[in-house]
Image (spheres, rainbow, N blue to C red):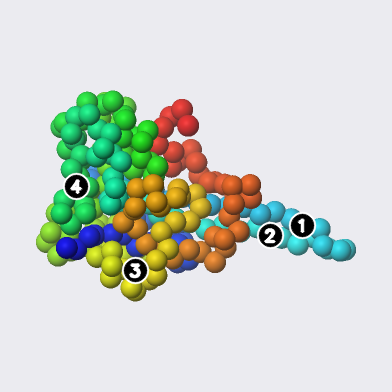
Amino acid sequence: MKRYAFYVDSSSCSGCKTCQVACKDKNRLPTGVLWRRVYEISGGGWESRGHAWVSTVFAYNISLACNHCDRPICVEVCPAGAYTKRPDGVVLQDSAKCIGCRYCTWACPYGAPQYDEQAGRTSKCSFCVENIDAGLPPTCVAACPMRALDFGDLAELEARYGQNYTVYPLPDPELTKPSLVITPHKDASRARHGSACVANWEEVRTQPDE
């Protein structure tokens, strides 16, 4: 059985956020709700080496939406049964069933479910099921000018791009088994909790009290 997944080439992502804007426009998302977010990671500084100072500054971007996990914790914690997982791995949410408890927003390690303060409900990326069921790519994938996004069967993406599933600041993939393959930026190995940070945290954070 096919298991749909996203591919993100962090080494090619320019941080233009076309994917983010295209998703927001296509789904008519309200202010403050982003189903796809581009994280801006930066770190490094200046080091004294002998009689010189050397720059160790680095930066990269990672585009992230719902990862339609193999073990979706949103499905497990939702008391209203608003989340379902299709046989092809796509995790869907019925916002009409949402009671606004926000358990999913607290439980998801990727911050995929987005809470709408005005509506009092959560929503998230649907993998553009109406597109993929019609043989078309998700809107974010089609919009990326750098071709840094792709989608397809997880096994095929792994064969084409490798088997890397995480990069700073993402969590351990063993938590939920995300349907996500990543090509890390060349400087991603330098990003540690002590030497790197999310530069646009106010933009991408999912909880107002984080």
Location of residue 75 (image quadrant): top left
- Three-letter amino acid code at disc 1? Glu
Q: What is the distance, in whole Å, between disc 2 and disc 1 at their CAs?
A: 7 Å
Q: Are marks 2 and 1 in contact (CB under 8 Å)?
A: yes
Outermost residue, left side = 134
Q: Residues within 10 Å of mark 3 (few under 14, many from 20)?
A: some
Q: Nearer the viewer, residue 189 or 51?
A: 189
Q: Residue at x 63, y 47 (%)?
A: 194
- State the SS at label 3: helix
Mark linked to residue 158: 3
* Eye-nearest disc, 2 or 3: 3
Q: What is the distance, in whole Å, between disc 3 and disc 4 at their CAs?
A: 21 Å
- Three-letter amino acid code at disc 3? Glu
Q: Are marks 1 and 3 in contact (CB under 8 Å)?
A: no
For the N terminus, which image quadrant? bottom left
The answer to whether one can see residue 20 in this image is no
Mark linked to residue 85: 4
Image height check: is 204 above or below 17?
above
- State the SS at label 2: loop
Dot 3 or dot 4: first in sequence order is 4
Image height check: is 51 above or below 120?
below
Residue linked to disc 2 = 56
- Three-letter amino acid code at disc 4? Lys
- Three-letter amino acid code at disc 2? Thr
